[in-house]
Image (cartoon, rainbow, N blue to C red):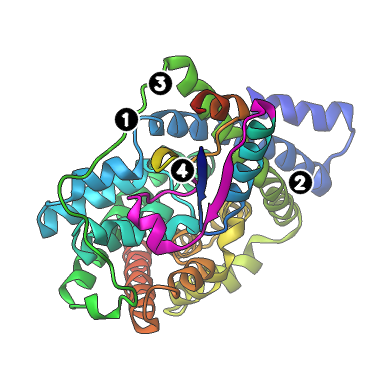
Amino acid sequence: MWYELSQSFVQNTLHVSGALGSSVHFFIYDTIKIWFLLITIIFAVSFMRTWFNTEMVRAYLAGKGEFTGNVLASLFGIITPFCTCSAIPLFLGFLQARIPIGVTFSFLISAPLNNEIAIAMLFGLFGFKIAAIYIAFGLSVAIIGGWIIGKMGVEKYVLLDIPTLSGDLHVSKTEESFQERLREAWKATYDIFKKIYLWVMLGVAVGAWFHGYVPAEFIATYAGGDAWYSVPLAVIIGIPMYASAAGVMPLVEVLTDKGMLLGSALSFMMAVTALSLPEAIILKQVLHVRLIALFFAIIGLGIMALGFIFNMIL
Amino acid sequence: MKIEILGTGCAKCNELEAKVRQAVAQSGKFMQIEKVADLQKIMAYGVMSTPALVIDGEVKSTGKVLSVEEILALF
């Protein structure tokens, strides 16, 4: 319905047609649709999150075995709030509670990868199926990657001496009313939306321009191909794009629409969300460069493997 | 009363500090406000998500920026 509405608005009210009309229509339609989905999904996730916090997750994960721990930590990564600036206290806090380092890494991989913005954007742009595939594969990268890191005996690369907590973990529970939770969720949604809405517009604008003016053959030649290097290239380009994940995804939608392979696109999006340079720089305060390099290498390889698999089966 | 704001220098930590200062000013009480950026100290409180608010050595909130009213209710 909204599709026809924005189309008729562009054709009948603005009187533009052809390539320009198609671009303008695409821009209006996509921006509003993505904004709406972002607000809805971020609100739903934020609301759920008022029942979870990292301290609770830690208390729950403490004492869990290696593999179970990896699985649970990855799952918790979906619902717990995470921001790069709290990566260190979180990392140290987990180790403090004697949670194995591999399990800690599972969480650290999963949390930014399965963030609400990425999920909302994927759902809005590519539909439920692709969003579900993204989450499922993101979880496997987090579980397996964390497990491998845990097996490599990297504890010596943690640069800070961490006093382990003695006794039971104390989790302060605050009783909140339904209204308070709603208000908190709304506030979180507002904060996130305020940060990304312009990026979304920018991404959609560039995408709209592509949509109307750049011929499909052009993209198929340069971004599409099933050349072996398209996946690694997508990952390398994705790493520095952390801050603008919301702006990058509309572009990727257009690229896939015009012939870029979905596997390359998914690898690219995972690289954008999971591998971030700011996070690496922050982690460098407490981790040896070798461990950070290993962390990036394992996730990078995992993401690339997924891209190759997808390009083959989809 | 001694108020500590735990945070490693993210934007939200500064936001929380500003709110705390506002709340203290509104309450008219005399309070000592301290920003704690030292990781070891933050860890000692068992806090993982910053910013966190600690009043007289007790962790009152973690991982969010409280509103002035919410902070006032804690005094």
Subunit under mark 2: A
| Quadrant where the image shows the C terminus of chain A | bottom left
**Where does the image place residue A64, in percent across and percent down from the top left?**
12, 51
The reply to whether callout 1 and callout 2 are in contact (CB within 8 Å) is: no
Q: Name the residue under label 1.
A: A173
- The mark that comes first in sequence, 2 or 3, is 2
Decide: few, some or many residues near mark 4? Use Cα within 10 Å; few <14, some 14-19, many ≥20. Answer: many
Q: Is residue A144 left or right of residue A184?
A: left
The answer for how far apart the CA atoms under marks 1 and 2 are is 51 Å
**Where does the image place residue A99, in percent across and percent down from the top left?**
20, 58
Residue A148 in the image: above or below residue A272: below
Q: Identify the mark at residue A23; answer none if there is no mark.
A: 2
Range shown magenta: B26-54
Q: Mark 3 points at which residue?
A: A176
Please check whether the numbered discs 4 and 3 fall on a single chain. no
Subunit under mark 4: B
Subunit under mark 1: A
The amino acid beneath tag 1 is Lys
Subunit under mark 3: A
Closer to viewer: mark 2 or mark 4 = 4
The amino acid beneath tag 3 is Glu
Q: Identify the mark at residue B63; answer none if there is no mark.
A: 4
Does dot 4 land on a helix, a strand or a loop? Answer: loop
Does dot 1 land on a helix, a strand or a loop? Answer: loop
Q: Identify the mark at residue A84; answer none if there is no mark.
A: none
Please check whether the numbered discs 3 and 1 fall on a single chain. yes
User: Please, which residue is most extreme toward the left here?
Assistant: A65
